[in-house]
Image (cartoon, rainbow, N blue to C red):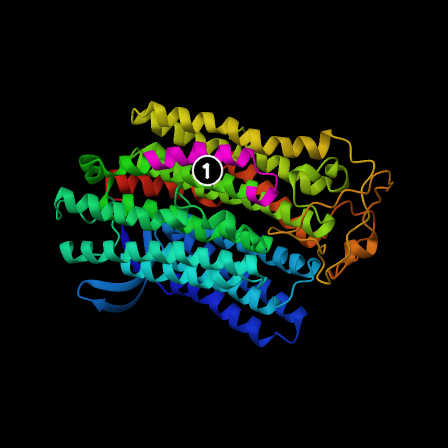
Amino acid sequence: MATQASWLPLLAVALPMVTAATLVAARHRPSLRDRLLVVGALVTFATLALLTPPVLRGEVPTSTLLEVLPGVTLSLRADAMGMVFALLAGFLWVLASPYAIGYLRGDDASNRTRFLAFYALCLSTAFGVAFAGDLLTFFIFYELLTIATYPLVTHKGDAAALAAGRRYLAYLLAGGAAVLVAFAVVYAQTGEATFAPGGFVGRSMTPTVTVITFLLFALGFGTKAGVMPLHAWLPAAMVAPTPVSALLHAVAVVKAGVFAFGRLIGFVYGPEVLADVGAATVVAVFAGTTIVAASLVALRQDHLKRRLAYSTIAHLAYIVLGFALLAPDSFTGSLLHIVNHGALKITLFFAAGALHVHLHLDHVSELDGVGRRMPLTMGAFALASLGLAGLPPMGGFVSKWYLVSGAFEGGELLAAFVMAGAGLLTAGYLFPVVHRAFFRPPPTAVPATPASSGRGTPASVGPGEGALPAAPASGATATLAPAPDSDRERGSGWPLRGGWPDADPLLVVPLLVTASLGLALGLGDLFGVFDLATLVTDGVFGGGAP
């Protein structure tokens, strides 16, 4: 592993911060502000693209910041594992930026500049998590990510949003405190904090201290990863606008949690040490239980975003379980599933947001025949559902193949059964949505559209984003009419001419790309993700690659 001085990791972290500052400066010119957001995302991803070739060659571009403790220097290192997370976040930010712009316009949201600025800051802190070269740098950015996301969770400012924000902070800051205590003990015992393939702890701590500190780390990281019973903040956060939900579930916050487990197991303790003390087994049990329990809860959710939230909890547990099995194939599968789940889940949330903005539909029970009115959106939803269920040729099939193979490799037959069988549960809560959209006729009678609250959503909005329309009075008749053009064009800035069959292109085009990405990841090694994952696994289990 060849460390090479480079300013690119620091630039990747700094560019979204600069973007956020320019958005605030352009707050009185909304059109310019929106363009600056997209440009910032593109330039940031270009920086990540420049980092990828040297990392694939086995180099580790490093930006050294300052020494804060003896032997602990704050540093940003673009190793192979960090690149897996950063490429995912960077590419999806390019797509999430125009989507967020279209969503905020379509929903007639207020405080858009604040929203978009914090959106950019979240990506900055996510890149800091990805490229942190040591535990202290990792902890700093890990906590900054929590703080930067809070204004997005509470963006609506109503009672439900503020309550969700309080729960969000309570869980994640408490988890951060557990991580800080564990870091302090590990540093005091080893005098080290720099990540190293295969772990730096070694035999420098007693088995008891090793187990205690590992479980403290797992407790802290488990809150952000949504491992049950530490998950309650995640469904509650669905009161936030859908671009935030997509950011939480596919790109930044929860992915930082599962990424942290990979760093912890592969670069702090190492599989050999954890196998000796058996500590990873505890995490594996909780993760396996979460897969089943969250999937069963998802089956009962009528609110679409809450169904997707519990789906996320289940699939994050796949990733945690893969790391905890301490097998090379399952470790590779977890890294691949970070990327595949990100592309597929952001597609599903993008679709949910398009349904909300275009037709004010938020519940599964409302979606009969909606595929005829939004064929592109629901077609992408169907494709992503196939991937999350683990069906070929989607990328989700590839990552789940490696996860199950790793379970067999390690002799963990129960874990293999849980991961393979849970694919049926995934199909059980996603395929009915597709069936309703394309294979059920639309309702023949619906009530008149509820009075607008003045912000682009029905006045009878419940805790989530929109509520079921009230039933028409007995004996009353109503007709189902297509959404008027004025409603489809409201605030979008896009003239929808030429028979465009769906919601605003700013909402639809990004989800078509992410659904296609989920397919492309199953057909080839897009962005070198598989090569990067293999490099990480070889380093962790063989000691030598980054």
Q: Residue at x 68, y 43 (%)?
A: 377
Which residue is under mark 1?
314
353 with respect to 542 (left or right): right
Q: Nearer the viewer, residue 89 or 166?
A: 166
Q: Find the residue positioned furthest to the front.
A: 474
Q: Nearer the viewer, residue 262 or 229?
A: 229
Residue 391, position as x, y percentages in the image? 54, 28
Q: Main secondary structure of the magenta part?
A: helix
402 with respect to 33 (left or right): left
Quarter of the image for residue 40 reads bottom right
Boundaries of the magenta span: 285-306
Q: Residue at x 38, y 49 (%)?
A: 223
Would residue 239 be visible to someone looking at this image? Answer: yes
Q: Residue at x 43, y 46 (%)?
A: 231
Is residue 145 inside the magenta stretch? no
Q: Local crowd at mark 1 within 10 Å, few (<14), some, or many (≥20)?
A: many
Q: Nearer the viewer, residue 90 or 242?
A: 242
